[in-house]
Image: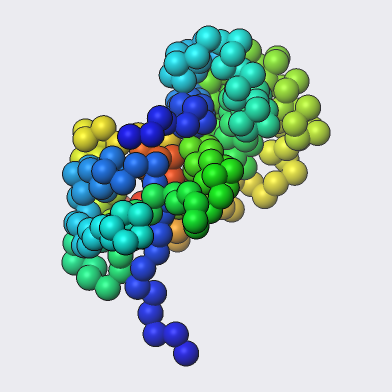
Amino acid sequence: MLKSLTTTQVWVHDQDEALAFYTEKLGMELREDVTVPEFGNFRWLTVGVPGQEDVSVVLMAIPGPPVFDEETRQRIGELMAKGAATALFFATDDIQSTYDELKSRGVEFQQEPTEQPYGIDAGFRDPSGNSMRMAQLG
Amino acid sequence: MTPVPRERHLLRARDAVDARYREPLDVPELARIAHLSPAHFSREFRRAFGETPHQYLQMRRLERAAALLRQTDRSVANICLTVGLKSIGSFTTSFGRMFGMSPAAYRAAHPPAIKRARVPTCILFAQARPQTAVFEKTARAAPD
């Protein structure tokens, strides 16, 4: 029996750019940032929502050889840039104020807060093209 | 930092359609968002997403119009303008091409919007009181 979900991952175009976005614009916190020289400077970089200690998101650079061949790396990058890679869903208690705040920090929204049968939700993107949604559940 | 894939610029233009389809958006404006010439932009957009920017914008508007026909009791003309389309004639034609029937027929083929709207029952009950209902106090106060 599985106990809980602890970590999920999004591909990112550039880890520094992603870290700045997730922490400075979305207000998430840096959890882990470890570079391993023995593995071609592989960088394990995670962030999380403040107060939700047990769930982290890995901001993963798309690896080339030896993990993926160059063509695969390239194609994941293209799919991600087209918005066809990953998605994250967040919850908020006050979607309008969160929307105003994120918008004022330059977050790109493709859907402003909209009433849905399950609450109010809005959609935005990270710099890499990943789909992000937040909802104030009714 | 590795260069940004060009698809990311195309996606930004497509997101602009999602965010601003109600506005008078057109392909040159979208091409500017993607930093490409209109002709090049349309080709690249189609290569990335399988349809032209014009088709995507049109689909987005018609799909929103369909939702408004199902979920509201606004007039067809009002819905046409709400989703950023100018001509009711061409709205009716392109709607028919996509949904196989006119906007009015589409609305008639779905349950009335009032059945979907989650108006609190207490409000509906209050509204359902007969117009002629007389409140006791009012009745007493009114010297008649």
Q: Is residue B111 left or right of residue B123?
A: right
Q: Please identify the residue farthest to the front as the structure is shown.
A: A38
Q: Is residue B107 visible?
A: yes
Foreground pick, A88 / A112? A88
- Point 67% across, 50% down: residue: B111
Percent from the top left, x then y, of residue A28? 22, 54
- Point 31% across, 54% down: residue: A41
Residue A35 quadrant: bottom left
- Point 30% across, 36% down: residue: A107
Percent from the top left, x then y, of residue A17? 28, 40
Foreground pick, B62 / B33? B33
> Which of the image's four quarters has the C terminus of chain B?
top left
Foreground pick, A45 / A5? A45
- Point 54% across, 44% down: residue: A70
Q: Is residue A114 visible?
A: no
> Which of the image's four quarters has the N terminus of chain B?
top left
Residue B103 quadrant: top right
Percent from the top left, x then y, of residue A92? 28, 56
Percent from the top left, x then y, of residue B119? 45, 53
